[in-house]
Amino acid sequence: MRIDAALAHGYVINQAAARKLYHFLTPVKFAADEWKLFREYEIVKLKRVISPVIELTDMYLNSSIGNDRTYKLTKLDQKNRKRPLFSEIKLFLWRIFIRTWLKKIRP
């Protein structure tokens, strides 16, 4: 199971999840692919698609996306990222009991 997302990915999403994301993301607070956050808030259930929907090509070497990701979080960003207590507890327990058994894959 892969727990970190990086690089280019394709997403398969059903209409019910799209509606939940629409309501959660309106007004815009987060990037549309903050999957870890959406999982923690129980907005969507994440499952892996085997085999990948999108593959990397050598063209990714010419990409400028993400080269300058240095920015400060505003107070509103910090407020929006504050997790509810229930989510904090779930994440804490997940890190102790589940994450330790997963193989972490880095690109």
Image: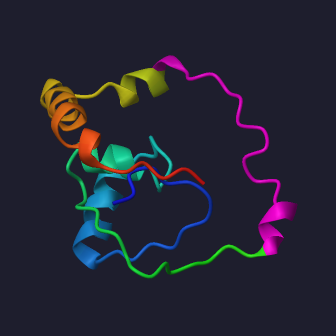
Where residue 38 sits in the image (x, y, percent)? 31, 49
Describe residue 38's horizontal placement relative to residue 55 as left or right: left
Depicted 36 relative to depicted 79: above or below: below
Q: Going 63% across and 22% down the picture, which residue do you hit?
A: 72
5, 107: nearer the viewer: 107
For this orientation, the residue located farthest to the top is 75
Residue 62 painted magenta: yes
32, 103: nearer the viewer: 103
Question: For residue 6, what is the image quadrant?
Answer: bottom right
Magenta stretch: give its range.
Answer: 58-75
Depicted 30 relative to depicted 90: above or below: below
Q: Going 38% across and 22% down the picture, which residue do you hit?
A: 79
Depicted 2 relative to depicted 36: above or below: below
Where residue 34 sits in the image (x, y, percent)? 44, 49
Question: For residue 8, what is the image quadrant?
Answer: bottom right
Magenta segment, prevailing SS (helix, strand or loop): loop
Q: Going 57% across and 78% down the picture, which residue do you hit?
A: 54
Depicted 57 relative to depicted 97: above or below: below
For this orientation, the residue located farthest to the right is 62
Q: Going 25% across and 46% down the picture, which residue do you hit?
A: 101
Describe residue 69's horizontal placement relative to residue 51 as left or right: right
Q: Quadrant of the C terminus?
A: bottom right
Color style of the picture: rainbow
Q: Quadrant of the N terminus?
A: bottom left
Where residue 46 sits in the image (x, y, percent)? 28, 62
Number of numbered tags placed on the structure image: 0
Residue 81 painted magenta: no
Question: For residue 60, what is the image quadrant?
Answer: bottom right
Describe residue 43's horizontal placement relative to residue 8 as left or right: left
